[in-house]
Image (cartoon, coloured by chain):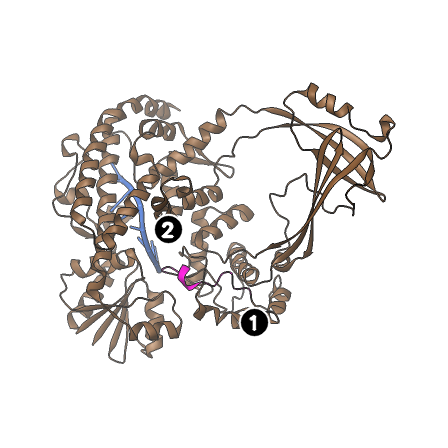
Chain colours: A brown, B blue
Amino acid sequence: MKVVIAEKPSVARELAKVFGANQKKVGYIEGKGYSFTWAFGHLLQLAPPQDYGFYGWKQQNLPMLPAKFKLAIRKVKTKEGMVDDPAVKKQLDVIKSLFDECTEIIVATDAGREGELIFRYIYYYLKCKKPFRRLWISSQTDEAIKNGFRNLKPGTDYDTLFNSAHCRSESDWLVGMNATQALSISAGNKAVLSLGRVQTPTLAMICQRYLETKDFVPQIYYQVAIQLKKDEQLFRAISTVNFEEKEKAETVLAQVLDLASGNQKGGHIKDVEAKAKKEPPPLLHDLSSLQQEANRKKGYTADQTLGILQNLYESKLVTYPRTGSRFIGDDVFATVPDLISKFTNHPLFGKQAEELLNTKLNKRSVNAKKVTDHHAVLPTGEYAGHLSSDRQAVYDMVVGRMIEAFHKECLKATTKITITSGIDFVANGTVIQSAGWRSVFNDNDEEKKDEDNATLPKVIKGEDLDITNKAILQKQTKPKPLFNEATLLKALETCGKDIEDEELRYAMKESGLGTPATRASIIETLIKREYIFREKKNLVPSNKGLGVYEVVKDKKIAQAELTGQWEKRLEEIRTGASVKEFKAEIADYTKTITQELLVAGSGLMQILKEEKVA
DNA sequence: GCAAGGTC
């Protein structure tokens, strides 16, 4: 008998189905000489400090550098404290007995770094010695599965991938556990002041933005606006330059040749620029883009959206939600027409679905190379029936986005008219000629510039028009808005963009800060620690959060670039570079940051006391 | 009482 082990039950079920295995047992499915079993994500984690003899939170324990890390069963919180998760224990027993009986293991955890780690931790924890081969697929269509099984790879091909995963895991433990204890101890050991490679740069981003906004001094400036008339149609144009002083604007205003000042045809058309613009449909959703849309449209937190999606996934209504890819492969694309046909009766999108069936589908979201462990989120096409309102809302976002993504481009005509009357003025207009994908939701662009005229009259270069009105507009510069969950999620994904080093930037883009599966929980962690709180939609730092930020802001642990540097090294390890060197560097850094924090944290004591009083 | 990573 051969054992196939998947990362999660849904994948094991899919694999079993393709093989025609259908005997359901407790914790696995059997048939055709195979047993299909599963994990639930990470069943094992690096053991906590006390398992190495580091009891309590004491300065003399620091830095904690276990000679050899141990694995422990994932814990759950109960009234009696943290205990081994009974469901995990049970499943590990199932896996152990299957591993004991089998002749070979086929590793079918997700095709990525963490998927490899999930299997290896189980394999080593159970002290298993059976041979294993690797299934490496990124979609679960029957064809992809069959192909994958015909091309199983030697298990050892992924040893270096495991090495990189293992380093990631241990490094996060070393830096996170030691920095957390060091800061907490030096601040009086009264509260948990957690720090970590991901949470601390995230906190720093929130604090930085908050301080920028708080210290922002708005600058007043002036523009001159004129109103023109062509064939009874009025339109507005704005001065191309801004004025810092009101007097300057008034001088310019006086020079405008408007009707009221006795000037007919005082607006000279200096230039007319007309352009046709094609706006491609948006990409399919990954988890992050869905969380952003749900936050914008419905105010759901990242965590709520993930919960709702998980629910829809367990009801088999949507595909795997914790994906970081906004693309599908050609195999999945082949199933899309059939999928779309399931929604021709949808109350909101039925008509558009119908229309799509008769047109060539847009392939912008089709790119097998950009599919990582999982493809973009799609509806499965299963009958949904009645859903609670929040589930319905998120489900509709998934369905609607699918319809949009395969829809035609939106065709727009933009016009830019430059008018001279004293100085230059400009009027912009955009007319949608063919809505294409924009007809799916039919909602207006949220950040449409208010200067835009919907339609502009037809004018020709050289012509002179009446100016029917003129005025001075007073405006002021605005600070960047505080982060909300939508903008923070986006920032976490792309924080690599401002990094100079090309290679570093690439590594960041691939990973961002955190992963799709963990970003919601990072935000929740910062809230649980009382570092930040929600104020309406915004994420605002507390005094405690600002205090921690002040202590760590210039240290590496608060920089998003730390993740980029690690990713670069981990990628080198994956392609065969030495593990030893990286581990030594991490140990060194652990010692340094621990020492620094043991000193620096004392300044936090006062803030913590004040918090208690308040 | 701690990290970040995965998932029910």
Quadrant in the picture for residue A451? top right
Residue placed at 25% from the left, 73% from the top?
Answer: A35
Asked if residue A359 is positioned above or below residue A222 in the image, the reply reads below
Does the rendering let one see residue A304? yes
Q: Residue furthest top?
A: A247
Between the residue at mark 1 and the residue at mark 2, the CA separation in whole angstroms equals 34 Å
Labels 1 and 2 share a subunit: yes
* Circle 1: element type: helix
Asked if residue A584 is positioned above or below residue A595 in the image, the reply reads below
Residue placed at 15% from the left, 68% from the top?
Answer: A130
Residue placed at 45% from the left, 27% from the top?
Answer: A211
Q: Would residue A319 be counted in the magenta stretch?
A: no
Q: Would residue A369 be counted in the magenta stretch?
A: yes
Instruction: Characterize the local packing of mark 1: few (<14), some (14-19) or many (20 or more) Cα atoms within 10 angstroms.
Output: some
Q: Chain of mark 1?
A: A
Does the rendering let one see residue A345? no
Residue A548 placement (x, y as % from top left): 33, 29
* Circle 2: element type: helix
Q: What range is drawn magenta here?
A: A362-373
Residue A54 placement (x, y as % from top left): 14, 39
* Depth order, front residue of A57/A106: A106
Instruction: Characterize the local packing of mark 2: few (<14), some (14-19) or many (20 or more) Cα atoms within 10 angstroms.
Output: some
Quadrant in which the N terminus of chain A appears: bottom left
Quadrant in which the C terminus of chain A appears: top left
Q: Are marks 1 and 2 in contact (CB under 8 Å)?
A: no
Residue A133 placement (x, y as % from top left): 22, 69
Q: Which residue is mark 2?
A: A510
Q: Is residue A118 left or right of residue A461?
A: left
Tell me the amino acid under the disc marked 1.
Answer: Ser
Residue A341 image label = 1
